[in-house]
Amino acid sequence: MKKKITALVLVAAMMAALAGCGGTAAPADASFAADASSVEEASSAEEASEALADGVLTAGTNAAFPPFEYVGDDGKPEGFDIALIRAIGEKLGVEVEVRDMEFDSLVTSIGSKIDVAIAGMTVTEERKAMVTFSDPYYDAVQYVILPAGSSIASIEDLKGKNIGCQLGTTGNYLIEDSIEGAAAQTYNKAIDAVNDLINGKLEAVIIDQNPAEVFVKNHPDEIRLIPGADFGFEAEQYAIAMPKDDAALAEAVNAALAELRSDGSYDALVEQYINSSEN
Ligand code: ARG
């Protein structure tokens, strides 16, 4: 983050890679970047990216949100988001380092402990006041998980109930702001809320659709799922959260995302991590 000159070199390399080389990532080596035409192509970014300056993009996540991020067999975070940020890093010619943290502390760590956050994070006005979001990369909605025998079927039925969620998530805010008299029981990990639901300590859990589907698939006899649309929950969109003052980074990340969409890599990742039944 401190090396401005390296930053310029890297931005030059990645802009050239994105603009001219048919999608292949350019290695961030100085000889390539020193090429005059690459430097010229980089000039669209007003200032070099601080986050990319050291050649390492540190991405914070919360690996308890399958299939977007979870702890793999080797103990390291993996999943759709992890694969996506690695693919973006490859396009930009930087190394990606993933840091597993609590979801609740991701936004405030951007620009200090981490460069960006990729964590199935919904774009919200409140967060927008603190970070710059990339173009959205996935549509989402909150789902309601219920004990198999529950009679809850409408937003009316949820009023005044004890509802579990992950701390600091849109599900958390939805319970507090939109369900009259409901008590939000917050957990650092959504799976702990699901376990308390199974143990009879909660009457419902509200969490994003895809992780909800994974959790319910693992306990088909004990819990079931109702789509948020049945409760009038609004559509959400996931995006990568970045520092507010790094326009060059946002530009580069969005360009990489667009390229991954157009070259088929994005769809391949959706197939591999989200549509396949393994996760
Ligand atoms: N989409 C929700 C939000 O932004 C939940 C995200 C939780 N992500 C995670 N990796 N635990 O608030």
Image (cartoon, rainbow, N blue to C red):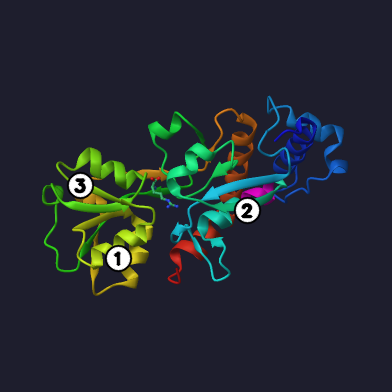
How far apart are the two marked residues, 2 and 1, measured between alpha carbons? 34 Å
- 133 and 63: which one is in front? 63
Residue 87 is marked as 2
Displayed quadrant of residue 196: bottom left
- Would you call the spot at circle 3 few (<14 residues within 10 Å), some (14-19), or many (20 or more)? some
Quarter of the image for the N terminus: give it.
top right
Residue that mark 1 sits on: 195
Residue type for callout 3: Ala
Q: Are marks 2 and 1 in contact (CB under 8 Å)?
A: no
Q: Are marks 2 and 3 in contact (CB under 8 Å)?
A: no
In the image, is the residue at mark 2 within 8 Å of ligand 1 by its beta carbon? no
Displayed quadrant of residue 234: top left
- 70 and 33: which one is in front? 70
Q: Position of residue 124 (x, y in %)?
A: 39, 36
In the visual, does 126 lie left or right of 94?
left
Residue plotted at (21% across, 59% down): 202
Closer to the eye: label 2 or 1:
1
Magenta span: helix, strand or loop, mainly?
Answer: helix
Residue 136 in the magenta stretch? The answer is no
Precedes in sequence: disc 1 or disc 3? 3
How far apart are the two marked residues, 1 and 3, measured between alpha carbons? 17 Å
How far apart are the two marked residues, 2 and 3, measured between alpha carbons? 40 Å
In the image, is the residue at mark 1 within 8 Å of ligand 1 by its beta carbon? no
- Would you call the spot at circle 1 few (<14 residues within 10 Å), some (14-19), or many (20 or more)? some
Residue type for callout 2: Ala
Task: Read off the magenta span.
Answer: 87-91
Residue that mark 3 sits on: 183
Residue plotted at (76% across, 33% down): 3
- Label 3, secondary structure: give it: strand
